[in-house]
Amino acid sequence: MTQAIPIRWPRRYNLMGVEVSATDYQETVDRLVEAAHAHYPAVVSFQAAHAVVCASRDKQLQQRVNSFDIVTADGHAVRWALNWLHNTGMRDRVYGPESMLRVCERATAEALPIYLYGGPSQAALDTLIERLREKFPAIQIAGAESPPFRPLTEQEDAAVVQRINDSGARFVFIGLGCPKQDHFAYEHRERIQAVQLNVGAAFDFHAETKKMAPPWMQRNGLEWLFRACSEPRRLGMRYLTTNSIFICKFVRQWLTQTIGFPP
């Protein structure tokens, strides 16, 4: 088992059974850089409402996510829920795509190599590498690979772990989507010798293969609507369903905490 080190991880609060960190960008990046320098294989997951609902309904996934070092409020709905239920006073979310850029900036400044694992194709990954090097010319990209859309064989999985560890990467950005990336990070935490960041759609956004919601929609918690309209067949029903479940679960938890409503 990985030995704990004295890093002051952000305080966590229960949201529908998921322990979410009350934190901000600065604290999140500082703690992850600290872990990278200490060679501690920390894991951070960026959880929007959809991800929280998925974890709340899947006990195995919930236990795995709750074992991570940081679980941020990736969406404003999650931040609002934490503020309402626990009075955390969070002023902003900690968004995966934005966090990825901030970690890359610090990694470049402190010569900490990164590894990219995920994406829809190698071509998209190559584009992401180009965009990152445009933003951070001195960034050290130790490796990058887009895995197949099937479970890896035991031999393939071992080879992935060896490639990442041999590369000397201190950060591994994982873009496999929720919940696949959370399962991957948990199952490889004792084997991958780097900080793992489950950043989801950040690969697509920074490679510019998919558009990000306009800033005003992001600020007002409407990014889900933009993405649903952009990919209605894939995301429309998903967001309609999980957003409704999120609201119902939030109301139930609020009633339980305030008037003792049965959980």
Image (spheres, helix red, strand yellow):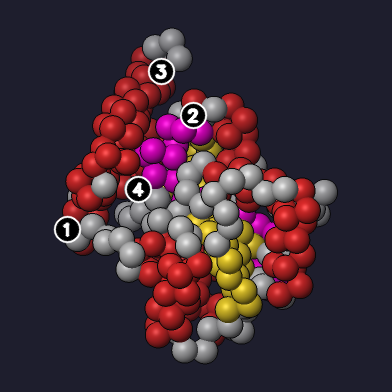
Dot 1 or dot 2: first in sequence order is 2
Which class describes the residues within 10 Å of circle 1: few (<14), some (14-19), or many (20+)?
few
Q: CA distance from mark 1 to mark 2?
A: 29 Å
What type is the residue that disc 4 sits on?
Gly
Checking the image for residue 243, the label placed there is none
What span is colored magenta in the figure? 31-55
Reading the image, the residue beneath label 4 is 75
Rendered location of residue 22, percent (x, y): 46, 49
**Marks 1 and 4: CB-CB under 8 Å?**
no
Q: Which residue is mark 2?
A: 56
Nearer to us of marks 1 and 3 is 1
- Measured in 3D between alpha carbons, the distance from the residue under mark 2 to the one under mark 3, in whole angstroms, is 16 Å
Please, what secondary structure does the residue beneath circle 4 have?
A: loop
Mark with earlier residue (3, 4) = 4
Q: Amino acid at mark 2?
A: Ser
Q: Secondary structure at mark 1?
A: helix
Q: Could you tell which of marks 2 and 4 lies nearer the N-terminus? A: 2
Q: Amino acid at mark 3?
A: Thr
Tell me the CA gap for discs 2 and 4: 16 Å
Please report the residue visible at 55 percent of the width from the left and 44 percent of the height from the top.
180
Q: Is residue 27 visible?
A: no
> What is the number of callouts on the image?
4
Give yes or no for residue 38 being in the magenta stretch: yes
